[in-house]
Amino acid sequence: MDVIFGKIPVLNALENTKKPKVVYLLNTSPDNKIRYMCEKNSVRYDLAPKQVLEKYAGKGMNTQGVVALIDPYEYKDLDEELDKVLKKKNPLVLMLDEIQDPVNFGSAIRSSAAFGVDFIIVGKNRQVGVTPTVVKISTGGSEYVPIVQVTNLSRTLDELKEKGFWTVGAAGEGDRYYDEVDYNGPICLVIGNEGKGISMMLKKRCDFIAKIPMTTNITSLNAAVATAVFLAGIVSYRRKNSAE
């Protein structure tokens, strides 16, 4: 069983098709909305002391008085997700290359949900999974944005290109700024990890390498912030061009 905690992640799980197996509510101040949602969805809930919640979430974790046990995250199938999005006018896919910090991963998922990413692609190796921390940081985003896990990111990027996707890599040495890219049509945005950025194998496959303008001596942003900046830029570009 996986563990999720926090009011928003648990509420989102209760609204999803894959419901928690059991929800533990802090016995001194049980959340009435979560109790109602458990009863509505026939999900068992128990009133429990703080020690029980910390047993599952970890000592000292901010559970907001609620912990849920849920089946392990099921990664989605790449071909199925591609079949869905290729019917759209402007599909948007995010590929994350070896993101190892759960906070960065969760934040990237949250931004993806906010900016309408159709699905996220991650690798099997050197990539943090959809852990309880990732779910909590995503504030429910992991329930709404499908996540696909593949064995080879380079081969997957080639497959996307064969299906008509333009691939945009985010890197400080880009030859253009992120707001100088044409984002019409199917787009796959590639974000590298916290230390070394995008791997050379992926970088060579990208149609464009774009950067974020910096005005100080700080020359890079973490993966989550870069993801949010690029996704906001893509959405703004598409809104502007659809109105013209």
Image: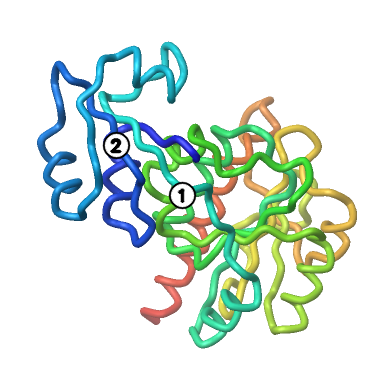
Q: Which residue is mark 1?
A: 111
Count residues near mark 1 (Cα–Cα under 10 Å), then give few for <14, some for 14-19, many for 20+: many
Mark closer to the observer (2, 1):
2
Which kind of residue does numbered mark 1 sit on? Ser
The secondary structure type at the circle numbered 1 is: helix
Q: Position of residue 102 (x, y in %)?
A: 58, 34
> Mark 2 — residue?
23
**Nearer to me, 40 or 11:** 40
Residue 215 is drawn in which quadrant?
top right
Specify the color scheme: rainbow
Kindly state the secondary structure of the residue where label 2 is placed.
strand
Q: What's the distance in space between the residues labelled 2 and 1, CA to CA?
A: 27 Å
User: Left or right: 149 with respect to 237?
Assistant: right
- For the point 43% across and 63% down, the residue is 116
Vertical relation: 52 (above or below) 220? above
Query: Residue at (15%, 39%) from the top-left corner?
Result: 35
> Could you tell me residue 179's position as x and y percent?
58, 59
The residue positioned 28% from the left and 30% from the top of the image is 24
Q: Residues within 10 Å of mark 2 (few under 14, many from 20)?
A: many
Residue at figure coordinates x 20%, y 46% from the top left: 38
Q: Is 86 placed above or below 13 here?
A: below
* Nearer to me, 230 or 154: 154
- Counting from the top left corner in percent of width and height, residue 6 is at 32, 32
Depth order, front residue of 93/54: 54
Query: What type is the residue that disc 2 sits on?
Result: Val
Residue 225: percent from left, percent from top: 55, 40
* Quadrant holding the C terminus: bottom left
In screen coordinates, is 201 left or right of 54? right
Give me the disc on residue 66. Answer: none
Quadrant of residue 162 in the image? bottom right
